[in-house]
Amino acid sequence: MQRISKYFDTSAVCNPHPKGTGKEKPLSINPEMTQTFKSRSVEWVDFVIYWSIALIPFCISISPAPANILMGFLIAAFLIKKILQREAIVSRTGISIPLLFLFIITCVSVINSINYKDSIKGGIFRLMQYAFVFFIMVGEIKNRRHIHRIVFFIAMGVVLVSIDGIWQVVAGRDFIRGYATIVNIGLLRATASFKDANLLGIYLSAFSPLLFGLTIYSKSKRKIALICLSAIALTGIMITYSRPTLLAIYIALFFLSIARKNKVIITVLIIATLISPFILPKSVKMFAKQVAYNPLRFMCNDDRIAVYRNSINMIKAHPFIGMGANTFMKNYKKYKESPEYRNIITLDYMYAHNNFFQMAAEIGLIGLSIFIWMLYRLFMECRNIYRALSDNYLKMVSLSLSACLISFLINGLTESSLYYSRLAIIFWYICGLSLSLKKFTPPFFES
């Protein structure tokens, strides 16, 4: 009876008809029980949030399905936690205002959409999903150990697909999803668990700079292990033969070396630049000759340039608010040149192969301007966080994450990486992780 009375008022059971009332007293719940249930519920959703954040980068390397399932659990757990604790869902960050305006212009762009369902589901709702991931990352990173676990699973994802790509080149098919290698301009290119070598390149170039940065500047006992892991990641990058990926990694490494004033790395990169024309595969040299050594044609191919010209036609048609979120592919055929650039014939249904062209076409030049404003605020915030951090490990994580963002954006000059659902989440994940480090700067850390 004592154990039961801890949670319930048992007087109603012992004396169902209190004197003078003639009525039965209702059974009441002890507030202590409610508080205990609430606390345990928060503990469970915290557990889901904690490990979902850590595992998402690794799951992306395997397949879209587990990553999407984890993302669903993450958002659901986050919303439950906020409801239980009666807290605001959106936290204040350095890019909250630009992100709000980006969401507004995305909604406004639906006015010109030829398919409202696609624009709402694949445009507005998808941006909301990415925004949730961003705010969850900013607010739910727990401590230094959580950061370390996230870095560990990012590294494991990079190494897994790199080994998978190496196996694919040797055996003919990758061991995760059974994809075969592809051949372009006489080169056998690895795709690993992705459908295309360029998509593998986007994944590796987005996360590898974090591994490279920690390897270059680590002074711990793990440096030898980090060097080995970085070598595997670099091999995976090389066998994609993705020119934008190689350029993105080159610029990311240059950024890291300049930021830390590392003359050795700068010298190595300059030497690599000078000797690269002599060590390129023969088929690449022949391709460069075919495009008359034009750097734009060499990096983008004639078919991409044709797509860019068609994209400009789309932007001219609706320059301010675009033709509707998530409608580029449906509108593309209507705006193709005739004949197209250098008599190239592009498909009637395709991406822009450039984040900025596709964004301008879908949500207009206003939307693109807001996104660029958001990027400016993002990098300024990352710079301030890096300067304020006193922990050397977190300082290098911060700098390396900035290199990851730079690499992702560089690769996005030739791919619509912000519009591939499997890869777009990486950008918002890294943004949130970068800004979450603000809580480890002195004023926040002390509080």
Image: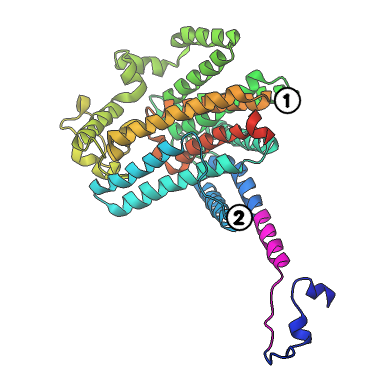
Instruction: Pinpoint residue 85: horizontal percent, then vertical percent.
Output: 60, 55
Image-quadrant location for residue 435: top right
- Looking at the picture, the colour scheme in use is rainbow
Q: Is residue 35 magenta?
A: yes
| Three-letter amino acid code at the position of disc 2 | Gln
> What residue is shown with label 1?
222
* Residue placed furthest toward the front: 20
Mark 1 and 2 residues: CB-CB less than 8 Å, in contact?
A: no
Q: Crowding near pointer 2: few (<14 within 10 Å), some, many (20+)? A: few
Residue underneath mark 2 = 85
Mark 1, mark 2: which one is toward the viewer? Answer: 2
Say left or right for 95 vs 117: right
Please identify the quarter of the rendering in which residue 79 is found: bottom right
Per the rendered image, the range of residues in magenta is: 24-44
How many numbered badges does the structure rendering display? 2
Picture quadrant where residue 218 is located? top right
Image spot of residue 366 (x, y percent): 30, 35
Residue that sits furthest to the left in the current view: 338
- Image disc number at residue 96: none
Q: Is residue 129 visible?
A: yes
- Identify the residue shown where x is 52% and y is 43%: 91
Within-10-Å neighbours for mark 1: few <14, some 14–19, many 20+: few
Vertical order, 34 against 47 (above or below): below
Query: What's the CA distance linking mark 1 and mark 2?
Result: 40 Å
Whether 416 is drawn above or below 82: the answer is above
